[in-house]
Image (cartoon, rainbow, N blue to C red):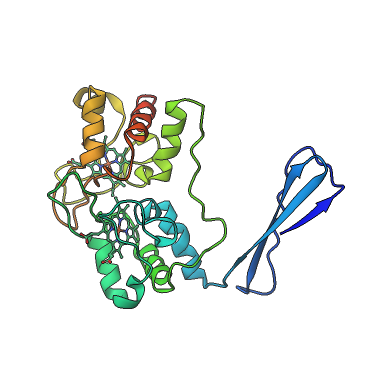
Amino acid sequence: MSIFTGVAVAVAIAVVAYGVGHYGERTKTVTVEASAAATTTTTVSYPSVSPAVAAGAHTFVQFACAQCHGVGGRGGVDPAVPALKTVGRTLTAAQLRHIIDHGLGASANPTQPYMPVWGEVISKTQVGNLVAYIRAGLPPVADTEAVTVPQGQGAAVAGAALYVRYGCINCHGPNGLGGVPNPLSPDKTIPVLSGQDFRKQFDTDAKIAAVIRSGSVIGRAPIVSMPHWGGILSNEQIAELIAYLKTLK
Ligand code: HEC
Ligand code: HEC
């Protein structure tokens, strides 16, 4: 880190410089205004990775794997969710693909998270990329931060960001419109979280909170069930998600 003086800028400037060659070592230089007269430059280096590993790192964040298994699979979120740092060495690519497609421990214990079934939701290509990323040891990849949750702007605003950050959107669709196929479930699709029927069935905050916290196991893979988010989402985050769902059509 180095300090340059004499640069006075009104807003923070971010400069992103990608270094040498195709898929070579990548360097991201972020220049941030520290005071009116000083600018701090931090250089973060990323190891060079293949396009499949890079895509896997993005998919890992998009499907909220990172929200249960920790950033970069480092664990530390909930005791029931393992870190993934070494699993790429102990399990084969086929075993990893099977776990992601079919889930693990579809738990009868609703107070504990389990590994969701992803086979109907995530494509073969995306699963292949996730496996490549896990087998590479989940290296840091630039620009893979999860959506940030705005503070001090009300519960519904926070809830809208959480809906993306925790991957609800991948299963329940934008605006809670549903439509994601779940062919062997009674409804044939993952349910909507908007509209008259949803509001009639889930007419209290307590009912919505209960299903988010404890999930709902419809059946085994290939059926997709509602994950248990208790232990992952705080009561406050669940209340924010409910506030957001109430703003939907
Ligand atoms: C709702 C929380 C949650 C989410 C989201 C989640 N997992 Fe898991 N995952 C778990 C739990 C809990 C286990 C342990 C299950 C068991 O052993 O009973 C697990 C286990 C695993 C394992 C096996 C680890 C081992 O040591 O055997 C892999 C691999 C894995 N998850 C990958 C993923 C990937 C990739 C994603 C994103 C597509 C993901 N997980 C999303 C909760 C989650
Ligand atoms: C892996 C896919 C998946 C993810 C991710 C997921 N859900 Fe679900 N969710 C389901 C399925 C499947 C059901 C239907 C369960 C049933 O019918 O028993 C469901 C049911 C629900 C319900 C009850 C609606 C109904 O009609 O049964 C609510 C509320 C809900 N989910 C909210 C959320 C929220 C909030 C998130 C993000 C924190 C989320 N879900 C993430 C698959 C998912």
Residue 131's place in the image compared with 12, above or below, is below
> At 18% across and 53% down in the image, what residue appears?
223
> At 31% across and 33% down in the image, what residue appears?
235
| Location of residue 203 in the rendering, given as x and y in whole percent from the top left corner | 22, 22
Q: In which quarter of the image is the C terminus?
A: top left
Residue 223's place in the image compared with 139, above or below, is above
Q: In which quarter of the image is the N terminus?
A: bottom right
Q: In which quarter of the image is residue 215?
A: top left
Does residue 215 appear to the left or right of 18 in the view shown?
left
Does residue 100 appear to the left or right of 13 in the view shown?
left
> At 29% across and 70% down in the image, what residue appears?
96
| Location of residue 106 in the rendering, given as x and y in whole percent from the top left corner | 17, 54
Residue 239's place in the image compared with 233, above or below, is above
> At 26% across and 62% down in the image, what residue appears?
101
Q: Quadrant of residue 234?
A: top left
| Location of residue 115 in the rendering, given as x and y in whole percent from the top left corner | 25, 56
